[in-house]
């Protein structure tokens, strides 16, 4: 019998394999990066996209655009709380704030993802401590 992690990964892998997206490589790379940030992170398909969680969902890929990949960082599906001021250090200016409880990071190709990897990992580590 497959363990819990194999059951969760299979639907996400199947979803990604079935995608017809010009940034397929970046989607795969971003997924791998997020799963390696912290062992508490798991994944599933939510909102018709790969979504990542610890105790709550905290990040969801936005796949509608074909010229860039967005990662939406949030505090869960039903969160009504705001992040405290200064809770997320963003010295590289990756975050575009969409509200008091969510922000996006835009990735425009493999070079952009490579350039932003270290800063994105630091942001995700801080973000999951707020969830």
Image: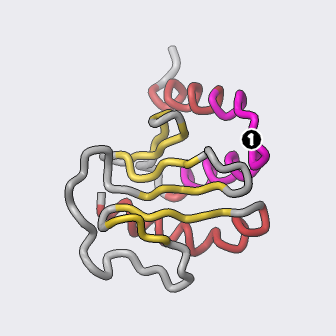
Q: Write the start and end of the magenta stretch as one range.
A: 15-36
Residue nearest the viewer, comparing 57 with 49: 49
State the residue at coordinates (49%, 71%): 96
Q: Please say if 7 is above or below 125.
A: above
Main secondary structure found in the magenta portion: helix
Residue 70 left/right relative to 55: right
State the residue lying farthest toward the top: 1
On the image, the x and y values in percent for residue 17 come to: 72, 30
Residue 31 falls inside the magenta stretch: yes
Query: Which residue is at a point 39% across and 52% down the rendered structure image?
Result: 58
For residue 83, side relative to residue 96 (left or right): left
Q: Which percent across, then down, holds residue 118? A: 61, 73
Q: Position of residue 43 (x, y in %)?
A: 49, 39
Q: How many numbered circles does the render carry?
A: 1
- The part of the image, by quadrant, that contains residue 127 is bottom left
Residue 107's place in the image compared with 23, above or below, is below
Q: Find disc 1 in the rendering and name its residue.
A: 21
**Looking at the image, residue 54 lies above or below residue 123:** above
Name the element at disc 1.
loop
Q: Is residue 17 left or right of residue 83?
A: right
Q: 3 and 21: which one is in front?
A: 21
Residue 47 place in picture, x, y as percent: 46, 36
Residue drawn at x 37%, y 46% is 57
Q: Residue furthest bottom?
A: 91
């Amino acid at each position: 019998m497959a363990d819990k992690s194999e059951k969760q990964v299979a639907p996400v892998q199947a979803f990604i394999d079935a995608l017809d997206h010009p940034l397929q490589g970046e989607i795969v790379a971003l997924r791998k990066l997020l799963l390696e940030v912290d062992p508490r992170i798991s994944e599933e398909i939510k909102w018709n996209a790969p979504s990542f969680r610890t105790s709550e969902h905290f990040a969801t890929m936005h796949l509608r655009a074909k010229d860039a990949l967005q990662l939406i960082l949030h505090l869960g599906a039903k969160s009504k709380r705001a992040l405290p001021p200064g809770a997320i250090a963003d010295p590289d200016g990756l975050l575009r704030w969409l509200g008091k409880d969510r922000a996006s990071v835009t990735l425009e190709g493999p070079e952009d993802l490579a350039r932003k990897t270290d800063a994105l990992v630091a942001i995700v580590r801080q973000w999951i401590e707020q969830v």
